[in-house]
Image: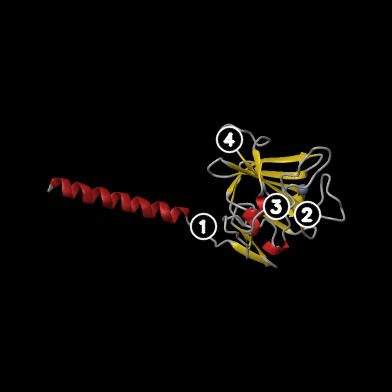
Amino acid sequence: MLKVIGTALLTAVVTSFFWIWFYSSVPTSPPTVARSGSVVTVKPTKAPPVTVAEQIIVGPSGLAIPVTGIKAEELTDTYDAARGAGRRHDAIDIMATEGSPVIAAADGKVEKLFNSVRGGMTVYIRSPDQKWIYYYAHLQRYAPGLHEGQDVKRGQVIALVGHTGDASPSGPHLHFAINSMAPGERWWNGTPINPYPLLAGKKASG
Ligand SMILES: [Zn+2]
C-alpha cells in the first residue's frame, strides 16, 4: 500500500514538473510566416529565419529533388559524363534558373561550407547515421544564417542555384553528389554513388 502511494506521489510530482517545463518553453509569440512562390519562410523569435519548400518532389528513395520546381522527368543522368582528362563527373547536374531555391534532399547536419576552384560555393551535409554526405555545388549564395553544425530538414532551403566555380554563366545548375562514407571518413572523402536513379525513380542510363 505504501508503495502504491509512493508511486502515485512520484507520478504527480513528475507530471507537474512536466507542465511547468512545458509552459516555460512555449514561445510567447507565434513564429511569423512569409510566403513567396513555392517556398515559405518561418521566422521564430530570436532565431535566423528558416525557409522551407512548400512542395517538394520525393523519389521512391525518400530523397527530395534538391531544386524547387524541377520534376523527375526533367532530370538527365550526367553521372558518367567525362569532366577533363580521365575525370568522371560522379554527380548529377540539375539545370535550373539562376537563384532557384536549393533544398536539402534529406535530413542531416551541415558538416562543411567550402569554396573551391571547381565547385565554387559548396555545402557538405552528412546524414544522421553518418553514412552519407550530400554535396551541393556552384551555389550563388547560402540561405541566411546557414552554418557548420546546423541541422537541416529535408525540403529546407539551404542555398540558391548559381554558377560559381567552373560552371558556365550561361548554364546555371546545381551539381549534386552523394557519397557513401566509411566510418571515420571526412567530408572530402567518400565513394560516390549515382544520385540519378534515386531522384528520378528510373534506372541509370548507359
Ligand atoms: Zn557537375
Q: Marks 1 and 3, how far apart in space?
A: 24 Å
**Whether residue 144 is situated above or below residue 192 in the rendered picture:** below
N-terminal label among 4 and 1: 1
Q: Which residue is mark 1?
A: 27
Q: Is mark 1 in CB contact (under 8 Å) with mark 2? A: no
Q: Which residue is mark 4?
A: 182
Q: Which residue is mark 3?
A: 143
Which amino acid type is marked by label 4? Ala
Label number found at residue 41: none
Question: Looking at the image, is mark 2 or mark 4 nearer the viewer?
Answer: 4
Q: Marks 2 and 4, how far apart in space?
A: 29 Å
Q: Nearer the viewer, residue 110 or 19?
A: 110
State the residue at coordinates (58%, 35%): 182
N-terminal label among 3 and 4: 3
Mark 1 burial class by Cα count in 10 Å: few <14, some 14-19, many 20+: few
Q: What percent of the width, then of the height, locates residue 84?
A: 83, 40
